[in-house]
Image (cartoon, helix red, strand yellow):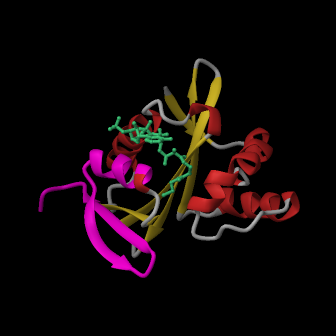
Amino acid sequence: MILRDVSHEDFVWVWECRNDETTRKNSISSKIISLEEHLQWMEESILLSERKMMIAVEEHERIGIIRFDVEDRDTAVISINIAPKSRGRGYSQHMLEHLEVLIKSNYKDIRTLKANIKKENLISIKTFTKSGFSLYEEVQEIIILTKSLYSS
Ligand SMILES: CC(C)(COP(=O)(O)OP(=O)(O)OC[C@H]1O[C@@H](n2cnc3c(N)ncnc32)[C@H](O)[C@@H]1OP(=O)(O)O)[C@@H](O)C(=O)NCCC(=O)NCCS
C-alpha cells in the first residue's frame, strides 16, 4: 500500500466516500455534502499549506483517504476514511503508520498527532489506540486522542 497526494481525478471519489452513510454518522458534521460544495472545498484544500490530503492505493485501487490539518504549528489533526468496501481489513493502521513516517521526515515541526473521534465510533477509537494514541480529553460527544512522535 502507498500513500499519494490527492489529485483532481480523486475529487468525486472522495465525495462519494464522504457521503457514505457510516462516514456521515461518524463525522462531526453528518450532513450530506453537495458535489458543488465538495468540489469547492477540495479546490481550497489542495492549496492550503496547513492541510495535506492523501489517497491510500493498493494494487492500483483506491482504499481510503487520510488527511491532516496542522494546528498550533506542532500538531497534526488526523482524519481517516476508508472506502466502504475496504473497511475491516486493517488498512487504517497501515495508513497511520505510513503517515507517521511521512510526517517525521517531511514535517519536522510536528511533534504530536491528534484525532477527534465521536465517542460512539468504537472501531475508530480502537484503530487509533492500536496505533499508539491515548486519551487526551473528552469534550461532550467527542473523544480526543493524541500521540507524541518524540519521547521528550
Ligand atoms: C473507522 C475506520 C477508519 C477503521 O478503519 P478499518 O481499516 O476499517 O479498521 P480495521 O480493519 O483496522 O479494524 C479496526 C478494529 O475494528 C474491528 N472492526 C472493523 N470493522 C468492524 C465492524 N464492522 N464491526 C466490528 N468490528 C470491526 C476490527 O476487527 C479491528 O479490531 P481488531 O484489531 O481487534 O481485529 C474505517 O472503518 C472508516 O473509515 N469508517 C468510516 C469513517 C470513520 O469512522 N472515520 C474515522 C473518523 S475519526
Q: Quadrant of the C terminus?
A: bottom left
Quadrant of residue 149 within the rendered picture: bottom left
Query: In this rendering, would 11 be left or right of 100?
Result: right
The correct choice, above or below, for 104 with respect to 93 in the image is below
The correct choice, above or below, for 124 with respect to 134 in the image is above
Q: Between residues 114 and 142, which one lies in front from this camera angle?
A: 142
Q: Between residues 50 and 78, which one lies in front from this camera angle?
A: 78
Q: Position of residue 103 (x, y in %)?
A: 38, 49
Q: Position of residue 49 (x, y in %)?
A: 56, 62
Q: Is residue 18 visible?
A: yes
Q: Residue at position x 45%, y 63% from top?
A: 120
Q: Which residues are magenta?
A: 123-152
Q: Residue at position x 39%, y 80% from top?
A: 139
Q: Residue at position x 65%, y 24% from top?
A: 61
- Farthest top residue in view: 59
Quadrant of residue 9 within the rendered picture: top right
Q: Residue at position x 73%, y 68% from top?
A: 31
Query: In this rendering, would 94 be left or right of 54?
Result: left
- Farthest bottom residue in view: 140
Q: Position of residue 60 (x, y in %)?
A: 64, 21
Q: Is residue 1 magenta?
A: no
